[in-house]
Amino acid sequence: MTLLGSSPPRPDGASKVDGTLRYANDLPMDGAWHGATLRSPYPHARIRALQWHPERAPAGAVCVTAADLPGPNGVQLLDDEWPVLAAELVQHVGEPVAVVAAPSKLAARQALRAIEVDYEPLEPTLDLSTAGRQEPLYSLELKSGEAEEELARAHLLVEGTYRTGHQEHIYIECQVMSAGWEADGSLVVEGSMQCPYFVHRSLIHVFGLTAERVVVKATPMGGGFGGKEDFPSVIALHAALLAKACGHPVRIAYDRHEDIIGTTKRHPSVVTHRAAVDAEGHLQAMEIDVVLDGGAFRTLSPVVLSRAVLHAAGPYRCPNVHIRGKVVRTNTAPNGAFRGFGAPQVQFAMERQMDRIARRLGLDPLEIRLRNVLEEGDRLPTGQTMDESCSARLCLEKAARETDFKQRWRHLEAQRRDIADGDSMPGVGLSLYFHGAGFTGNGERVLQSVIEAALLEDGRIEVRTAAVEMGQGCDTVLPMMAAEASGLELEDVVLAPPDTSRVPDSGPSVASRTSMVVGGEVAHVVSEIRDRVLAWWSDRQESGAAHTVEDGLVRGEKGQSWPFREVARSYAEAMGPLVVSRQHEPPEWQVFDEETYQGVAYPTYAFGADVVEVEVDPDTLEVSPKKVTAVCEVGRVLHEKLCVGQVEGGTLQAVAWGLMEEVKLEEGRYLNDRLATYIIPTIKDSPEMEVHLLEKPWKGGAFGAKGVGELPMDGGAPAAVSAVENATGIEVDAIPATPERFLALTSARRQVPSEPEDPERARGADR
Amino acid sequence: MKALAPRTLDEALLQLTQTPDLRPLAGCTDLMVSEPEDRRDWSGVLDLRGISELRGIEWRGETLEIGAVTAFSEIRDSPEVRQSFPALAEAASRIGGWQIQNRASLGGNMANASPAGDSLPVLLVLDAQVVLVGPEGKRSVPYRDFHLGYRQTALGPGEIIGWVQLPKPPVGATQFFRKVGTREAQAISKVVVALLASVSDGQISDYRLAAGSVAETPVRLTEVEESIVGRALKPEVADLAGHLAAQAVRPIDDVRSTAEYRRFALAQVVRRMTLQLVR
Amino acid sequence: MKSELFVNGKSRVVEGHPMDRLLDILRDELGLIGTKEGCGEGECGACTVLMNGEPVLSCLIPRIQCEAATVETVEGLAAAEARAFLEGFVSDGGVQCGACTPGIIVTALALLRDNPHPDRQEVQTALAGNLCRCTGYEGIHRAFDRGAEDE
């Protein structure tokens, strides 16, 4: 069977192009009321008093504040430090202070005006520069060898400080959640979320209900990118609190403005590098300091930091490494999960550092990487030895070959000064990157994900996981993996909706883990059902011989065949329900010591190399990315078109993060809290993309897959900025690399034209 | 709320006479970007889109007349505009995206009176006249006297924009338009520049320069024009023009860009346009 | 106010405040949930519909301007036109999460009516008002390229 690697049409495609698919905000309201949120106007303040004036609000409207919570005022993630509603203090602009519900959207908005809050503004901590002095939210250290000693006797010491900014997810569907209480006191929540069991757990935590009395249903998502990993728990709690207070189901649908100001973003970072390099450019030692801006609450920052620290040294060989990481608190919206989860920030820094080292040694960006690239048998700073699935060199060489990188880079570098006035400045840049597959460290072991399959009465097999379709294509790929493993047809497998009353906790749809981890287990449980049905069928045949399943047919010894579905239907009729479940166990050898940060942080790694070509406008310094060649080694390509789509979409997000996307804050307030001012690329801004998928299967993963969702987020920004450097000679160590930033960097060289002498008399003026 | 949708200009004027605070509606691409509560608080609206007299593009003698509610897509595609006022056609094609161009109108861009309105510097260099109609009748004002301040116009109570009149540009004049935006489309400008210039006998004989997003209103850079007109056409003139343009404006830092960058980009773009005259 | 619109070929009479948005009329009053809200201010294009044959943003059109208008939404267009293009759009990776997709389909079909063989630049010009956050737009280009090849 050759289903994997082919590209059957995605089952949700038709209903997406004809507009019939119902997303969370498209479901009928069925008498639901609308919720709205009162938000803090201050980055930091004490709430002296909060008064709800029902007489000023539309009839029936209800208001819920922190004082009304039935349980702990905390959103349960890694801990419950994140308040459901601000109590005594507000910690960021846009923090929810109270929520209201009313029969119509307009009435709910009007009801917000019936709440009076008396704030005492406090001194806020607004950015990393001042936050650094305070006790961090979390810190980590990773050490191998003797970095300090080696740095002290370095042949060449190269230092750099690299900065990245916030990034807003801009999923096109804003956050939406509905909640309603049943007559028996159970709670049903439905909405747009990546992790139904995260929401489930946070509802149990606050309402003190048993697990069975909370039902969470995930709807198809209009995009997530990590932004619907942590935050849906907050909005689900709000909707459930309001539904309880008003006695109706309640829906909260954020508009774009509040989605931008109120929800999590990518952590800004400052990464400082010191590297010792020998005369040939080999890395001898690195000291790396990683500081992430966590925003107001801890949320998932510790695990973001963990991934950041583990990726900070890049896919390079270096015997002596010392990495320190911390997350600091600022009075801005909490930063949380975003595609890449800390890895893009540190790899931006590492890649810029490699380019800087190359420049110091007179090498080109390809050469410096080739001399240091991680290979099989090399050890990461964690002590993990790279196995045969390490493909960094493969990616690097392929990207260079496809683009004739070395030649073109050198050519553009040399011709830069000869470009005629008015001609656009071309540049080409390179990046090499890797992404640890699945959860970090012992994450998968702690999760204890359970995957289930059940034989249906009609003979099809229902796969039960909590994986949610957010565009990435899990509803396409999971059945493919089941069919491939079991010999069934795609049509013999159905997916149960991600509803906690119907599916077990197979873990969150994050960390590029769905195919690799969940898919592998799906293949197992479906195969086990097939085996049981087959065994039963064999017993009933005269020969009693073993049978096989191929292309959906059970094949007997003498060339007979029966449709599996028919066989399975007879099984169900005769034997009753059959449910198989299985808990995911990471490989035994995947052991990571959270104290020393030594061991196997990820069972394997996906690798990639990008070449970005840009043109810079000679007058305005505007950068147009013209073409990206992305080479990604993902273990095994499960669905070619979806895999390419992940790389293309992630690459554009990465290039845009590097060149244009910027959250602008002033005194903790968002200046660009709209889509008119938070700029993401249109189709006109987007480069042509050429994707090359490579496979170095990892034997521990499902069919060799390593995960692809986040990988492409790691390489676009440093390659784009490197291309700008090639085009202009401007060294950029902070993103977004906007024209304004280039100008500030080069104001000594490129200024407004100075006043010439009287041009009538100026020399050479007789053209 | 009063909601009126007259079919003729006379009908509209009568309604405006009776209720001068009616809010005129055209493409609504700016007006609808408002809080729904606020829209409900308006006392009344008057939809101008159904008035055929206010729509269309037509030569009247030496003047091209464009109805106020004419959408930018019509302006963008109009053979008359493309032939005689290419800078305006170019500006129209750089506003928003296709959907916005199908709705947004020239009159709306003017009435909205944003310093970043993309078509406005073009109107300044084309020496456009604006015909206003209201309870007191018709009056014609030069566009440069229409846009008075940040979101302030010369429109009186009950008065609406009827038509924009563009005098035929001098024979041989070259027009330039450049928008430096936050991205390639769906962008609000950081700097927008329009230039109309003529060269005769090796001398710059006409030089009309305007810029948007560099002051409270789009501005005609008359000091620059005065310094450039009459000079021999040489590359150094381009440097001078860029330099003077940067000196002539007082842009601000805002969410889209910085004062420093705006000044820089303006200078560079003006220089480039002027250099293109040379070549 | 009461108004009559012709939506996907059928006369529909609706009633409400003159400044209500066409987007809400379609979604809340007529149940046409295929038209999405992505920003509510004319930036993202998710709410694109054809009004009198032209692509427009339904979040920016007040009820008062809908009287007697012909409106085509994704539901009507996708049922009637260019089935092959739509299938290719899915299989070439033009769709991921799907939230921008209805708006993109409406704009794309409007483009194809005027210009059955748009080149890359024409596609970019037409779709510049439709933001997509998933695909990087490359799958959308492929769908148009394939349309050209199929001819």
Image (cartoon, coloured by chain):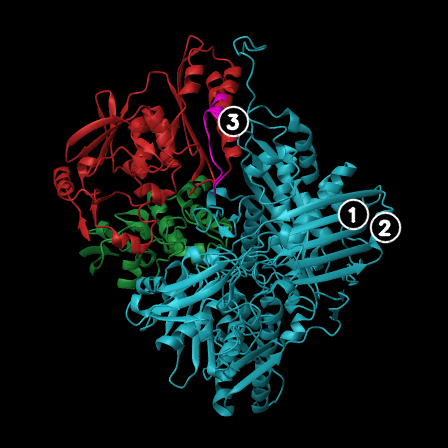
- Whether residue B14 sits left or right of residue A559 in the image: it is left
Residue A205 in view: yes
Residue A591 percent across, percent down from the top left:
74, 71
In the rendered structure, the answer to whether residue A153 lies left or right of residue A8 reads right
Name the residue: 47% across, 89% down: A573
Q: Is residue A164 above or below residue A245?
A: above
Q: Position of residue C140 (x, y in %)?
A: 46, 50
The segment highlighted magenta reads B244-257
> Crowding near pointer 1: few (<14 within 10 Å), some, many (20+)?
many
The 10 Å Cα crowd at callout 3, few under 14, some 14 to 19, many 20 or more, is many
User: Cα distance, mark 2 to mark 3?
Assistant: 48 Å
Q: Residue at x 64, y 50 (%)?
A: A129
- Kind of residue indicated by mark 3: Gln
Residue located beneath label 1 in the image = A275
Residue at the image position 58 percent from the left and 61 percent from the top: A5
Task: Please tell me whether mark 2 sits on a helix, a strand or a loop.
Answer: helix
Figure colour of chain B: red
Q: Which chain's colour is green?
A: C
The residue shown at (81%, 51%) is: A285
Determine which residue is flagged by label 2.
A150
Height in image: B212 above or below B12? above
Helix, strand, or loop for circle 1? strand
Q: Is residue A50 left or right of residue B15?
A: right
* Corner quadrant of residue A62: bottom left
Q: Earlier in the sequence, mark 1 or mark 2?
A: 2
Q: Which residue is mark 3?
A: B268
Q: Which chain is cyan?
A: A
Q: Is residue B211 above or below residue A757?
A: below
Query: Could you tell me how far apart the alpha carbons at marks 1 and 2 are, in whole angstroms?
Result: 9 Å
Q: How many marks?
A: 3
Q: Are marks 3 and 1 in contact (CB under 8 Å)?
A: no
Residue under mark 2: which chain is it in?
A
